[in-house]
Amino acid sequence: MSGGPNLDVVVLVGNPRAGSRTRGVAEAVTGALLDRLGGSPDTVQVLELAEVVGVSFGPEPAYGAKAGPDPFAAVRSARLLVVATPAYKGSYTGLLKVFLDQFGHRELAEVIAVPVAVAASPAHADAAASALRDVLVELGARVPAPPLAVPESRLADAREIAARWADQHAAAGRQGHRFAPRATPVPATSPTEQEGRH
């Protein structure tokens, strides 16, 4: 990942409900990355798909009720794209799928993407994050670090989890290293809680 004050950052939230905890995790990850890459929070554009797009099964994209910049153009022009979704039936949401289906093969070739998933269980979060990574790669995006999978039981620790993930992956991502496609799972309990169980 290459950063700087002029880094164009887009946070894409695939939750069908605006203002979700999924958005909170995505913003925590974005903030942690910008802290380490030297970017400015002023460059961040948050796209809540629940507000800006509609569902379309035809060739033309559908737009939601909220007016604003073209969300498709924003994603295409992003240098860093953080895509967050709750897990739904073992994968990312249908709303996010419909949105991403509007992009052509390798249309996001200039974009560096970070997939993030939230689910009730670590296994479901991991599956959704990995599925999201696969579709972003299919669209041509570079995904230089493992996706982040966060169980719902750890959402209160989102900033700490995001900071730890960014510490592990921001520097190597800046150098263009490739990582294994498996998601970075977050334990369902905090280290302190785990120690108490042993």
Image (tube, helix red, strand yellow):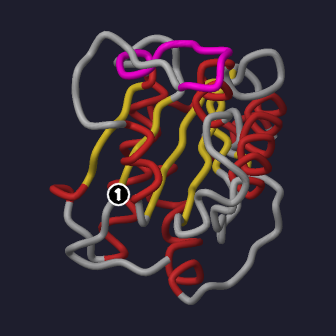
Q: Residue at x 40, y 64 (%)?
A: 33
x, y percentage for residue 27?
A: 36, 43
User: In the drawing, does residue 154 fall left or right of residue 131?
Assistant: left
Picture residue at 68% right of the left edge, 28% below the top: 97
- Is 10 above or below relative to 123? below
Residue at 69% x, 60% y is 106
Q: Position of residue 20 (x, y in %)?
A: 42, 19
Q: Residue 127: which quarter of the image?
A: top right
Q: Position of residue 183 (x, y in %)?
A: 76, 52
The span shown in magenta is 50-60
Magenta span dominant secondary structure: loop
Question: Residue 9 colored magenta?
Answer: no
User: Is the C terminus in the top left, top right, bottom left or bottom right quadrant?
Assistant: top right
Instruction: Give the residue type at disc 1.
Output: Val
Indicate the quadrant where residue 68 lies: top left
Residue closer to the observer: 154 or 21:
21
- Residue under pointer 1: 9
Nearer to the camera, 125 or 189: 125
User: Is 165 displayed left or right of 146 in the figure?
Assistant: left
Q: Quadrant of residue 21?
A: top left
